Image: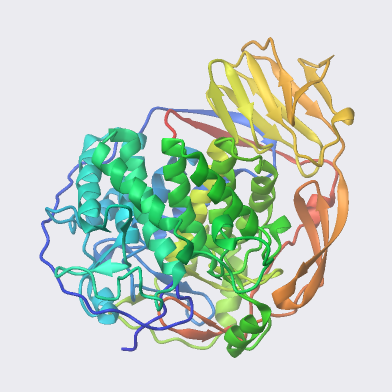
Amino acid sequence: MANVLRRREFFKAGTAALAATDVVVNSLASQPKEPPKSRYQADVPDTLDLAERARFAINALTGAASPEHNYEPYHCAHFWCRPAYMTLFTAGPCRPKVLQALPMMRAMSGSQQNADVDLKMLEGVLRDVDENGLWWMKAPWYVANYKEAQVWSVSQGRLIGALLDWYRYDGDSRWLKTAERVTQGTAKMAMQDEQYAWYGESRGRSGWPATVDPTNPEVDPAAWVFDNGNALYGLARWYAVSGDKHTLELARKAAAFMQKPMLWGASEGPTMVPGPERGFWEGHYHSHTRGMMGLLEYANTVHDEESQRFVAAFYEYARNFGIARMGFFPAEIWPLNKIEKKFGQFGGKGVIDEGCAVADMVWLASMLSEAGVGDYWDDVDQYVRNHIIEHQLLRRDLLEEISEAGPEHKPDPRWETVDHVIERNIGAFSSSTDPTMLYPRWTLCCNANCPGALYKAWSSSLRYADGVAQVNLLLNRASAWMDVDSYLPYEGRVVLKNKEARRAHIRLSTWIEKEKVRCLVNQKVVPTRWLSNYLLVEGLRGGDVVAILFPVKEKTEQLTEAAYGQTYTCNFKGNTLVDIAPRAERLSWRREPSDDGTVNPVNKGCPLYLRDEFKKNSAPMKKVERYISATLV
């Protein structure tokens, strides 16, 4: 079978043959403990609720598991054909991403749907971690493409993060001990000199291939950023909990490698700006953004201000591409003449966006803001309210309609399934869209990374310490300290139901006019006091209700997506896109490549931003069960 498309290369085929290995199987017998929780009924506005989105995501993340194949999640799903199917082909490297997303989604939502599947998916990975802390991918569908079992730097780093998140979630010391072993294995994999440490994509028992040479000009800079950033992410996470000085030194050298000038710069751009010093780049979007997430994790952990500034400059440069106002980011960025030459083969204009790209930008903007490197909360708000949730597949009728209209597909029984595929994927995240239409398929990378971004927005929307509740995003959120009810985008109304806070600092978006804000505590108007964009409310007691009222600004903006050669008329209520024109009648590309090596005809997509309901000025209400987790991961 032909080699398939790797995610970071996006559309280039190629693989390296590496040596196989024996493994030591780890047996895990017990279920993760359910954390302490609180559930109660509440009447709330029927507006964007990320906890509800997490419940849907659990359906899809666990629905992707293959019980007949050691609970390995399927690598790709295709809804463009009849019947819809999922495939394991080339599966492996993305598995830790699912393991990491699951405790996040359960902490958000309290859902216990398919809870037994979580442990089985964990067992399926950890049985292949050897005594040296290396996780070997050796399933037949993986080896069929990559020829032999391998260890991936990306997967090692993500597995460390997943195990530490599980430890935070249920307190089981096994995850901590295994994370230490995987960290030790990741450290032993590193190539280093006195100044730098670096990783390639994957290695076998005999070591790294000769191509893993930082002086080799043929290696894509995006690959260096992606591989080293993900490994660094795991090292930084482990140092944060262990304080291990050897891990810290290795992380410091990996961070230095990631900022080498050879990895940065763009062929076009302002020539008076030293691009390598400002994090300018071109190539695969997610490879760069995910890699920089690792550098930022390190920088925030050790308070490396220089690296934080580098990531902030990188982020602000990346935000220039696509349509950041709605969270549409292209899968790759290049000069337009190269874009046309590279992607014209797929039959249409533009560079489709990638779910991982907007997910990474949510994460970066949240972490930079919390670290105090910049105030990017409005960016987080508009990415989350718009394109990332538009990636989530919630309409079964549309998926069934698309599948029925597609060509017939004969499944390969070795690694494909057609069993209740659409039902199992309600809540999944598509891997790609045009600005107004979604491509009907996913790759596991996006399907697992997007939920993690929702968690980052949800958790950072409300923080609490020393009696102060800090509300960073006007999103619905239940917590042990305070509940937030948001009536946006229908109404300029946010209600805080206090439980423990003595003070509340509430950030209002920059589109809200401060002089028109009214604040009521227990229905009595109180003076408004401000610290930058934060409204300060003091002297609170348990049971107090704070209402913040303001006009919702409606605005029409002209936003151009240069690769598509199209200027869109976008109608916003606050940060919420309620309408966009022109709307495409069909998907731009006629064919789309997938990570399983197929290039599929796509005739019918899912229309986006069908939001006439949001044009109303009164929010509907609903009764829900709210859930409070005792732990954040």
Residue at 18% across / 68% down in the picture?
207
Quarter containing the C terminus: top left
Nearer to me, 114 or 319: 319
Number of marks in picture: 0
Q: Is residue 370 above or below residue 314?
A: above
Residue 248 versus residue 493 in the image, above or below: below
Side of 54 where 348 appears, left or right: right
Identify the residue at image location x=82%, y=37%: 512
Q: Is residue 170 visible?
A: no
219 versus 117 height, above or below = below
Q: Residue shown at 40%/51% (left/top)?
A: 255
Q: Is residue 324 in view from this perspective?
A: yes
Horizontal side, residue 457 vs residue 24: left or right: right
* Location of residue 206 (image quadrant): bottom left
Provide residue 632's location: percent of width, then percent of height. 44, 34
**Quadrant in the rendering for residue 625:** top right
**Which quadrant holds the N terminus?**
bottom left
Q: Quadrant of residue 6?
A: bottom left
